Image (spheres, helix red, strand yellow):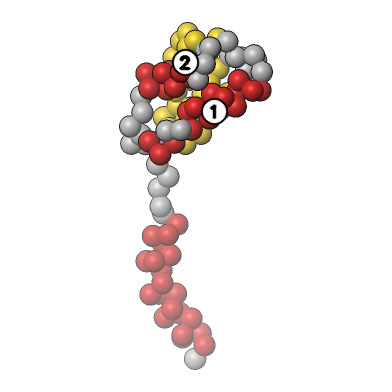
């Protein structure tokens, strides 16, 4: 009797289970900017904070490498932000210049 109950339960739960494990992860876009004027960890925090002010517009992650002079921003699919928006946020943060966007 227990085996029959288990078999019936698994049969009816299978579509629900299959749906829950087949959820797709949205692809994202990466914007990498070469930035001059960053010299320390404080600069990284300032730039990260500036970009995160628009997180609700699709910013997934921010990574600042002061030694390499780069700021990488990962955007969610469907983000309303563009490279020019991110450039403006970095330069508005104070004393930084975006030299190149990749």
Q: Does residue 19 lie above or below 79 as drawn?
A: below
- Badge 2 crowding class, 10 Å Cα cut-off, few under 14, some 14 to 19, many 20 or more, is some
Q: Residue at x 41, y 54 (%)?
A: 22
Say if residue 51 shows up in the picture: yes
- Coordinates of residue 20 in the picture (x, y in percent): 42, 59
Badge 2 marks a residue whose secondary structure is helix
Q: Which mark is residue 71?
A: none
95 and 11: which is toward the camera: 95
Residue 42 placement, left or right of 83: right
Q: Residue at x 49, y 27 (%)?
A: 50
- The answer, for residue 33, to whether it is visible in the render is no
Residue displayed at 42% across by 45% down: 25
Marks 1 and 2, the one that precedes in the sequence: 1
Pick whichever, 48 or 83, lies toward us: 48
Q: How many marks?
A: 2
- The residue where tag 2 is placed is 91
Q: Position of residue 19 (x, y in %)?
A: 39, 60
Residue 62 in the image: state x and y as whole percent.
52, 30
CB under 8 Å between discs 1 and 2: no
Q: Residues within 10 Å of mark 1 (few under 14, many from 20)?
A: many
Q: In the image shown, does 27 or 6 lie closer to the viewer? A: 27
For the point 45% across and 57% down, the residue is 21
Q: How far apart, in angstroms, are the residues tagged by discs 1 and 2? A: 12 Å
Residue corresponding to mark 1 = 48
Q: At numbered mark 1, what does the secondary structure look like: helix, strand or loop?
A: helix
Q: Quadrant of the C terminus?
A: top left
Task: Residue 38: name its quadrant.
Answer: top right
**Residue 65 x, y percent position in the rendering:** 61, 20
């Amino acid at each position: 009797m227990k085996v029959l109950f288990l078999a019936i339960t698994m049969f009816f739960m299978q579509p629900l289970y299959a749906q829950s494990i087949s959820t797709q992860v949205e692809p994202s876009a990466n914007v990498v900017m070469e930035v001059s004027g960053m010299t320390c960890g404080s600069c990284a925090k300032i730039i990260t904070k500036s970009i995160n002010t628009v997180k609700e517009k699709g910013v997934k992650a921010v990574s600042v490498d002061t030694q390499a002079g780069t700021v990488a921003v990962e955007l969610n699919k469907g983000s309303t932000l563009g490279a020019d928006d991110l450039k403006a946020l970095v330069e508005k943060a104070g004393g930084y210049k975006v030299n190149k966007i990749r």
